[in-house]
Each structure stands twice: as C-alpha cells, then as structure tokens.
Image: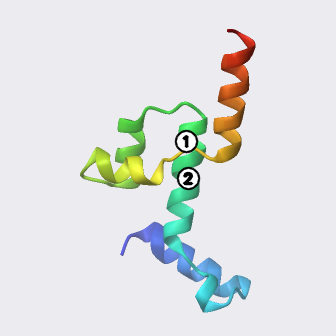
C-alpha cells in the first residue's frame, strides 16, 4: 500500500470513524472530481492517482451533478 493510503488509514482510525466508513477509494474519487472541476487535464490526474490506464482515471473522474448543472446553465446562458 502507498504511503498516502497508510496515512489515510491512520488518520481515519485516530478520528474514530467506524471501520465500515473508512474508504480510501472515496478519497481518490473526491480528489479526481475536484481536479476535474478545477479543469486539470485528465492525463495529469491519471499520473496523480497512479493509474496505468486513462480509462481507470475516467471512471473516478465523472463530474458531479452540481458541476454538470453549472456547465449546462453556463452553456445555455451564452447560447
């Protein structure tokens, strides 16, 4: 496991989170979404997450409903 994964596990344990609520995967997903919403290139996100395949990164980097709604409203406003 990566050093970041170990740090996450240690901090989650120290925080008192129940074991069934400690999900490193969710942290990676949240990071990917935040980077996508900040317009970071998907290839750079792939490297940051340590993925070999851009397809793996695309799964994590699905935009949130909120950002999709903002994008639609923005596009319609300039239409």
Discs 1, 2 touching: Cβ within 8 Å: yes
Q: Which residue is tagged 1?
A: 35
The residue that appears at 51% across and 49% down in the rendered structure is 32
Residue at the image position 69 percent from the left and 85 percent from the top: 17
At horizontal 65% and vertical 28% (from top left) the residue drawn is 71
Q: Which residue is mark 2?
A: 31
**Disc 1 secondary structure class:** helix
Image location of residue 5, percent across then percent down:
46, 72
Q: Is 56 positioned to the left or the right of 26 in the image?
A: left
Mark 2, Cα crowd under 10 Å, few <14 / some 14-19 / many 20+, is some
> What is the quadrant of residue 39 in the picture?
top right
Q: Is residue 22 above or below residue 58?
A: below
Residue 67, image quadrant: top right
Secondary structure type for disc 2: helix
Q: Is 46 in front, or is 65?
A: 65
Q: From the viewer's perspective, is residue 11 above or below residue 13? A: above
């Amino acid at each position: 496991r990566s050093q970041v994964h170990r740090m996450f596990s240690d901090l989650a344990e120290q925080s008192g989170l129940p074991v069934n609520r400690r999900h490193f995967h969710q942290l990676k997903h949240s990071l990917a979404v935040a980077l996508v919403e900040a317009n970071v290139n998907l290839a750079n996100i792939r490297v940051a997450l340590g993925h070999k395949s851009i397809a793996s990164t695309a799964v994590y980097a699905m935009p949130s409903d909120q950002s999709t709604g903002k994008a639609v409203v923005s596009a319609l406003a300039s239409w």
